[in-house]
Structures are given as C-alpha cells and as structure tokens.
Image (cartoon, grey):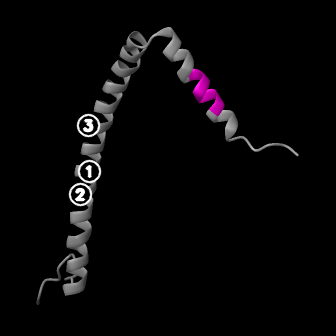
Amino acid sequence: MQKRSSTPKLDTVQNARRVVLASIEQTEIESSIVHQVMSAMGRKGGKIGGKRRLETLSDNRRSEIASQAAKTRWANKPKKK
C-alpha cells in the first residue's frame, strides 16, 4: 500500500503563487528595514537642524518668518459671510 503524503501536491499555478507571495514578503521585510534606518536619520537631522537654525537666525529674521507664517495661515481660512 502507498503512503499518503501529509501535504497535497501543488499544481503549477499554486506553486507560482506561493513563490510570488514569498518574494513579496521578503521585499516587505527589506523595505521596512530601509524605512526604519531612513526615519532614524531624519529624526537625528531634525533634532540638530532646529537648534542650529535658532542659533544662526537673527531676532529680526525670526520675527519676519513668524509674521509671514501667521499671514499664510490666516489667508487660507475661509471668510464667514
């Protein structure tokens, strides 16, 4: 008597699907590692950049930037009728 296999044999299409899903899963793992590294680099630069910009800008220039930002924020508000 023949022994039965514990897993059914896959046909060509099922096997191709299994290979594609495995490759997608591996790609997602690699992209998540790259994403983590790049976000860490961005955080590091952002922490340094704000402090350095504060030191290099004069008080007048910071005031001009803040005024321009406030005008831009309020310009986008819809006016009430």
Q: Is residue 49 left or right of residue 26?
A: right
Disc 2 to disc 1: CB gap under 8 Å: yes
User: x%, y% of residue 33?
Assistant: 25, 44
Residue depth check, mark 2 versus mark 3: number of the one nearer the observer:
3
Q: Which residue is at 26% across, 60% downward?
A: 25
Q: Which residue is at 26% across, 63% downward?
A: 24
In the structure shown, which secondary structural element does the residue marked by tag 2 occupy? helix
User: x%, y% of residue 44?
Assistant: 31, 25
Q: Work out how far the residue at label 2 is from the one at label 1, CA to CA, in angstroms.
A: 6 Å
Disc 2 to disc 3: CB gap under 8 Å: no
Q: Work out how far the residue at label 1 is from the one at label 3, CA to CA, in angstroms.
A: 10 Å
Residue at image mark 2: 27
User: Counting other residues with Cα less than 10 Å from the Cα at mark 2, is it few (<14), some (14-19), or many (20 or more)?
Assistant: few
Q: Is residue 16 left or right of residue 81?
A: left
Q: Which residue is at 34% across, 19% downward?
A: 48
Magenta-drawn segment = 66-71
In the structure shown, which secondary structural element does the residue marked by tag 1 occupy? helix
Tag 3: residue type? Val
Q: Is residue 20 above or below residue 44?
A: below
User: Counting other residues with Cα less than 10 Å from the Cα at mark 1, is it few (<14), some (14-19), or many (20 or more)?
Assistant: few
Counting residues from the start of the chain, the first of labels 1 and 3 encountered is 1
Residue at image mark 3: 37
Which quadrant: the N terminus? Answer: bottom left
Q: Is residue 69 magenta?
A: yes
Counting residues from the start of the chain, the first of labels 2 and 3 encountered is 2
